[in-house]
Image (cartoon, grey):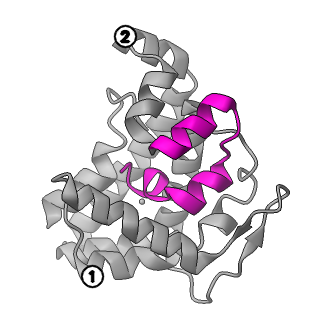
């Protein structure tokens, strides 16, 4: 289990990866976006679970019930967490920045602490891992400033990355310039939460 969660948190932040982690006490309200889209927390959670189920089918990680219970409030809070980014067009940069915002939220609201307890880490181990995650988030944020150069160095284009990450429907919207972070939260929240 530790390996799975470390992979989710750290693997998505490894700087060599050109592709792109938690509790609110009150239930987040639906957030209306300028484009008239209503982002319903329960629908976002349903979409997240569907994304996770699709990952299971493809042989990726299986998420424990305990893990899902820890992240459910944060997934449902995505519209509030990312309220200033909802209308941004989906790009490598905008998805990366949304992911950074989400990770910072998780680090600051106690969710990462809950996750570390789930792993069974003692206080010292939890402190070390949390500091590593903070450092990786800062590095990822700094590295994102050079996203075009990173992609070019890997021999891929932004469109290549999006094709490998977005659903077919979302990729078509992306190509037309019609996919926003709000749309992504509504249909593929796992891309921001855990890079699925």
Is 151 above or below relative to 75? above
Residue ID for mark 1: 66
- Could you say whether the residue bearing mark 2 is in a helix, strand or loop? loop
- Give the residues drawn in magenta, as a range: 168-196
The reply to whether residue 146 is visible in this rendering is: yes
Quadrant of the image for the N terminus?
bottom left
- Relative placement, left or right, of 84 versus 25 is right
- Relative placement, left or right, of 120 versus 145 is left
Residue ID for mark 2: 155
Residue 153 on image: x %, y % = 39, 10
Q: Nearer the viewer, residue 70 or 136?
A: 70
Residue 31 on image: x %, y % = 75, 71
Chain-order first, disc 2 or disc 1: 1
- Could you say whether the residue bearing mark 1 is in a helix, strand or loop? helix
Residue 57 on image: x %, y % = 20, 58
The residue sitting at 52% across, 37% down in the picture is: 171
């Amino acid at each position: 289990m530790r390996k799975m969660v470390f992979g989710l948190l750290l693997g998505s932040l490894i700087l060599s990866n050109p592709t792109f982690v938690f509790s609110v006490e009150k239930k987040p309200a639906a957030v209306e976006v300028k484009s008239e889209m209503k982002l319903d927390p329960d629908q976002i959670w349903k979409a997240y679970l569907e994304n996770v189920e699709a990952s299971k089918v493809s042989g990726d990680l299986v998420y424990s019930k305990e893990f899902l219970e820890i992240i459910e409030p944060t997934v449902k809070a995505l519209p509030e967490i990312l309220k200033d980014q909802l209308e941004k067009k989906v790009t490598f940069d905008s998805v990366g920045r949304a992911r950074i915002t989400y990770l910072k939220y998780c680090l600051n609201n106690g969710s990462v602490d809950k996750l570390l307890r789930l792993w069974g880490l003692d206080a010292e181990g939890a402190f070390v891992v949390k500091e590593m995650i903070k450092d990786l988030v800062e590095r990822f944020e700094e590295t994102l400033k050079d996203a075009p150069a990173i992609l070019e160095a890997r021999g891929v284009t932004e469109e290549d990355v999006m094709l490998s990450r977005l659903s077919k429907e979302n990729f078509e919207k992306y190509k037309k310039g019609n996919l926003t972070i709000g749309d992504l939260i509504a249909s593929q929240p796992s891309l921001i939460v855990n890079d699925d």
